[in-house]
Amino acid sequence: MLKSFTVLVLGALALASCGHTNNLGSYKIKGTTASYRSLVESGAMKSSAQMTGDTAASALTNVAASIGSDAASRQTEQKIASAISSDSLARFFANGMRQSTRDYLQLRGVQDNGQYIVESVLQEFSVNSSSSGVNATVRGTSRIIERSTGKIVWEDQETNTVPLRSTPATGSTVSAALASAFNAAQLVDLSVPEIRTVLINSADEAGKQMAETLRSDVANLK
């Protein structure tokens, strides 16, 4: 039966989480200068559509056949590519760190040769469907690096998932499979503005989560 249909962009899902590093107390960082960078994890646009298990329900077979997994995957990739550039999405993600380092560490932004480098890396953004609904996910890492030594002063990773459309849980294997197939069809029908809006919102929220973690760490400094 059809378990899931997923479109991955800049697939870096295999990377392990960087965890959280907080060495702010060891550096006299407040009031210094910083150069800001927003980057995208290297990688190409990828797609994945999997059909697993026995196809027991003829209705499900018909739905899956009508979607055409590969074709649906390509269509959604094209929509994501036309909705927003990865560089633009990376900048939305980086906004939270840019603002919070200025607010809580009083860093002064300079174009080149800042005493510190504030680097935000967009590692994954995806739009996917399953039996629970259609969602968009953004994952990224931000870190503060001391330029003179290359040492990491602070680092954190955040993942944010925004639901586009939800499907109530049914508790039935066949019903869940049908819901998954239905949501895969819904995914193909998403408009470019819908995809753009949800990805921007997800990137923005992930950046805000990162900013809140930094605020909390600064608040705990002696």
Image: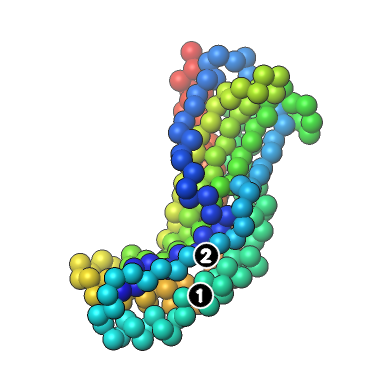
Q: Residues within 10 Å of mark 2 (few under 14, many from 20)?
A: many
Is the residue under label 1 in contact with that under label 2 (CB below 8 Å)?
yes
Q: With 61 as the anchor, is 123 left or right in this view? A: right
Q: Residue at x 58, y 55 (%)?
A: 10
Residue at the far right: name it. 112
On screen, residue 52 above or below 19: below
Res 47 label: 2
Q: Amino acid at mark 2?
A: Ser
Judged from the image, the secondary structure of the residue bearing numbered disc 2 is strand
Visible residue check, residue 205: no
Scheme of image coloration? rainbow
- Residue ID at (55%, 27%): 154
Compare residues 34 and 63 and report the one nearer the observer.
63
In the rendered view, tell whether residue 53 sits above or below residue 150.
below
Q: Which SS class for mark 1?
A: helix
Residue 120 horizontal/vertical position (percent): 61, 40
The percent position of residue 90, horizontal first and vertical second, equals: 63, 49
Q: Which residue is mark 1?
A: 70
